[in-house]
Amino acid sequence: MTDTAFDLFARISHSRTADEVVRQIELLLLEGVLRDGDRLPGERELSRRLDVSRPILREALKELETRGLLISQHGGGTYVADIIGQVFSRPVVDLIARHQRATEDYVEYRRELEGITADLAARRATEYDRQMLTRIMEAMREAHAGGSFDAELEADVELHNAIGEAAHNIVLLHTLRACYRLLAQGIFFHRHLVFSSEDARGHLLAQHEAIYAAIMAGDGLAARKAAQAHMDYIATAIREAERSGEWQRISQLRMQKRGLPPQA
């Protein structure tokens, strides 16, 4: 990290205590500025930027580590711990992964969350939020035009994350990040099913464009409706992909029963 006009680790101007350092880093974690896996500056650099002594800094970092917010690697620095994944416990995640009905509940849950989040983002987004959303949309358009499947999937998640940040609601932000984490791991469904055709990818791009346009226009109602329409499309796409896969399986079994080898 380098010094900027908006240094994350701002100088502590009042009582230079470990509690003040803890509070500042806590807020950066809570507000989603620091993400899991981010590396903090070295001890000397961080103490300089916070304008506190190194013993005070060590005390604060130790407190944050004890509470499971930071992880120190001997000789490798201090990192933000994986606090997002803990929103859903491992037993719940494993249970969800084994039952298909959870997919429908997940999409229904996200439909409402995404609608609320897009609405808030349209009304609360700052100029910096809009700049970030624009950059991500440009990357998504470029990936779509170039046929870069993985890059388009990545831009999809980044856009939803950025909308969550633009909503400026801490609880929504962390809840959505937990949802996207499970989605990226393929817990509910494989996103490749939704992006399975050029036609589907075109529809998804248009839906993202509609959400983006409504947020940029500051139209909360339109943003909510666009986000919910997007989730409705995904729900339909999942059902059709699963049904098609089941039909394929049954047809194959029938051919095997008749002793007919499938054609290449």
Image (cartoon, rainbow, N blue to C red):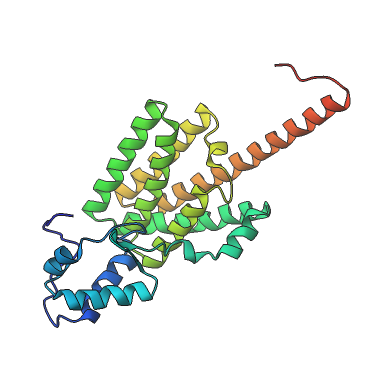
Q: In this view, does 19 lie above or below 118?
A: below
Residue situated in front as seen by the camera: 31 or 40: 40
Classify residue 259 as left or right of residue 28: right
Displayed quadrant of residue 36: bottom left
**Picture residue at 64% right of the left edge, 60% below the top:** 95
Classify residue 75 as left or right of residue 86: left
Q: Is residue 10 above or below residue 163?
A: below
Q: Where is residue 106 in the image (x, y as percent from the top left)?
A: 57, 55
Residue situated in front as seen by the camera: 36 or 225: 36
- Which part of the image, by quadrant, shows the C terminus? top right
Q: Position of residue 263 (x, y in %)?
A: 74, 16
Q: Where is residue 62 in the image (x, y as percent from the top left)?
A: 30, 75
- Which part of the image, by quadrant, shows the N terminus? bottom left
**Picture residue at 34% right of the left edge, 43% below the top:** 213
Question: Farthest residue toward the front?
Answer: 75
**Picture residue at 52% right of the left edge, 49% below the top:** 185
